[in-house]
Amino acid sequence: MKKFTKLLLALGGISAVGAGLAVGMVSNNVKTTELVKADTAVTVSESLSCSYQTQRLWMAIDPDLTWWTSDSAVSGIHVWGTGFDSFYGCEQYANNDESGRIYYYADVPLTINGFQFVRMNSGKTAVYNYTVNGTLGYTTKINYVHNATTGGNQNIDLATLPANSVNGNLAGKILEGFTTCSDSTLNGYRAANSFNDNVIAKMSTVELNTFNVFSLNDYSYSDYLSNSNSYSSTMTRSVTYTAADKWTAMQNMASKASGAFNSISKNSDSSSTLVLGGIAGIAVLAAGGYFFVRKKKSI
């Protein structure tokens, strides 16, 4: 009986060692997986055209994240939803703000269920770093990427642009991501109040003047119809619209839909720009030429 008891104890010890080895192996496998994740091979999809089926998401790299663009790395976005899991490259906004931040944007499907920004190699074939998952539902705010991490992924802070420091051209690029033919709060005229509070109200008078004359890559609804109800790289642009034109049209559509629009008192020094922009916007609405937009293809 004593021998049998010793045998059981010995077997128990071996089992414990085996379990320890198994746990160690699983733990090592998890660590290896995390390390592999930092250099994952991916296939980047062709950049989408900004339309009523897309939303434009923005990110900014904080100055303390100096390594993000090292080794010729570029920024991208990982999105997923029902039936798709895709990576897209981000477009870099040329003008940085006074804080030294670099801004990026990407047009992604309106139907995404989640997203995270990524740092990729210059060939866009591998991901080096991920951010934590972003918060859905905000297209007039910026996802600020920080140096701190959670679970190995870079933290992001969803916030509005800094007050009185918004570049007029940046504001124009944000507006470009919306369409006046959609009633969506993400990419249509129902986002007017959000755009007003988070972008327009943050601009100085000087930058508002810059915003008013900013030329958009938009197409009118008539251009869309003339191109067999579709978008294409050979599409003809009949009219070049300014941000003031589109913003006026967007406000008018929002007012007609809700019966009220929370406008602000901030005005441009150039009254002629505002009047012409307002007349142009109303004329477009009267003609039924709602704004559509299309982003140039990435190279």
Image (tube, rainbow, N blue to C red):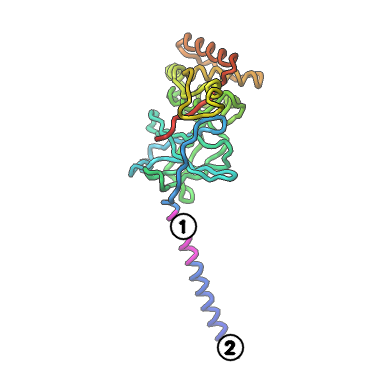
Query: Does 273 sit above or below residue 105?
Result: above
Q: Residue 49: in sight, yes or no?
A: yes
- Indicate whether residue 158 is drawn in magenta: no
In space, the residues marked 2 and 1 are separated at their CA atoms by 43 Å
Q: Amino acid at mark 2?
A: Phe
The quadrant of the rendering that contains the C terminus is: top left
Q: Position of residue 231 (x, y in %)?
A: 51, 29
As helix, strand or loop, the secondary structure at mark 2 comes to helix
Mark 2 and mark 1 lie on one chain; the one further toward the N terminus is: 2
Q: Residues within 10 Å of mark 2 (few under 14, many from 20)?
A: few
> Which quadrant would residue 11 be assigned to in this image?
bottom right
The reply to whether the magenta stretch includes residue 31 is yes
- Predominant secondary structure in magenta? helix
Quadrant assignment for the N terminus? bottom right
Q: Quadrant of residue 169?
A: top left
CB atoms of marks 2 and 1 within 8 Å: no
Q: Is residue 115 above or below residue 188?
A: below
Identify which residue is drawn at 51% across, 74% down: 18
Q: Is residue 265 left or right of residue 64?
A: right
Up the image or down, 226 lies above or below 110; here it is above
* Mark 1 secondary-structure assignment: helix
- Tell me where the magenta segment starts and ends, as one range: 25-36
- Residue to which mark 2 is pinned: 4
In percent of the image, x 52 and y 42: which residue is there?
Answer: 79
> Is residue 241 in view from this perspective?
no
Number of the front mark, 2 or 1: 1
| Image side of residue 6 versus residue 127, left or right | right
Residue 209 x/y as whole percent:
44, 16
- Amino acid under label 1? Thr
The disc at residue 33 is: 1
Give how far across and how far down residue 239 sits, in percent: 48, 17
